[in-house]
Image: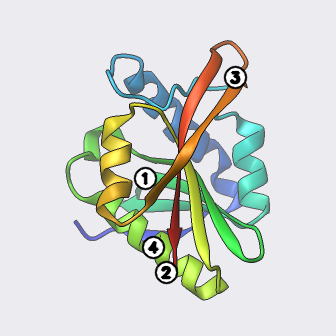
Amino acid sequence: MNVEIRLAEIQELSLIYEFYRVVCTALENEIYTPLWQIDNYPCIEDIKNHINNEDMYIAIYDNQIVGAMAIANHNDYSSVHLLTVHPDYRKQHLAESMIKKLFQIADERKNHKIILDVVKDNLPAEKLYNKFGFEFTGEKYELIERIGNVCFNTYEYLT
């Protein structure tokens, strides 16, 4: 699969929002999920802020969005948010291409590490990050509106 991964542009906001709506709808029937609920997390304001901060990346294949992620820059490290693949394009190594792009961006920024959180027991996500050398660093609990107290596994990758 030849996919282009690039910075999102503000005029793509509604397309990106619709992409996340489709992903969230598909996740409702999955066993392992990030517990996302459209308009709660992710919401259009979060996506807009990531675009305006120039840290929202989209994967394009055949002129449509098939993946997305936000890579926030914190001067000496990057944090990853909202990384996902369209349900119709899973199991085609797209997430691996996105992780490789993440490494490239962190390198260009001269970040010394990449951090992320995964809902505990979201096994497909944990497997992906472990495959690429992310190290488990602990657990944290966060109160999520309309969901409750959620346990996250935290990971980091030293560049």
Q: Position of residue 94 (x, y in %)?
A: 31, 58
Mark nearest the camera among 2 and 1 is 2
The amino acid type, in three-letter code, at marker 1 is Gly
The CA distance from mark 4 to mark 2 is 5 Å
Q: CA distance from mark 1 to mark 4?
A: 12 Å
- Residue type pointed to by label 2: Gln
Residue 40 appearing in the image: no
Q: Nearer the viewer, residue 142 or 29?
A: 142
Q: Which residue is mark 1?
A: 67
Q: Secondary structure at mark 2?
A: helix
Pointer 4 with pointer 2, Cβ within 8 A = yes
Q: Secondary structure at mark 1?
A: strand
Q: Earlier in the sequence, mark 4 or mark 3?
A: 4
Task: Residue 86: tell me if it is visible.
Answer: yes
Say which residue label 3 marks. 144
Q: Position of residue 25 (x, y in %)?
A: 44, 22
Q: Residues within 10 Å of mark 2 (few under 14, many from 20)?
A: few
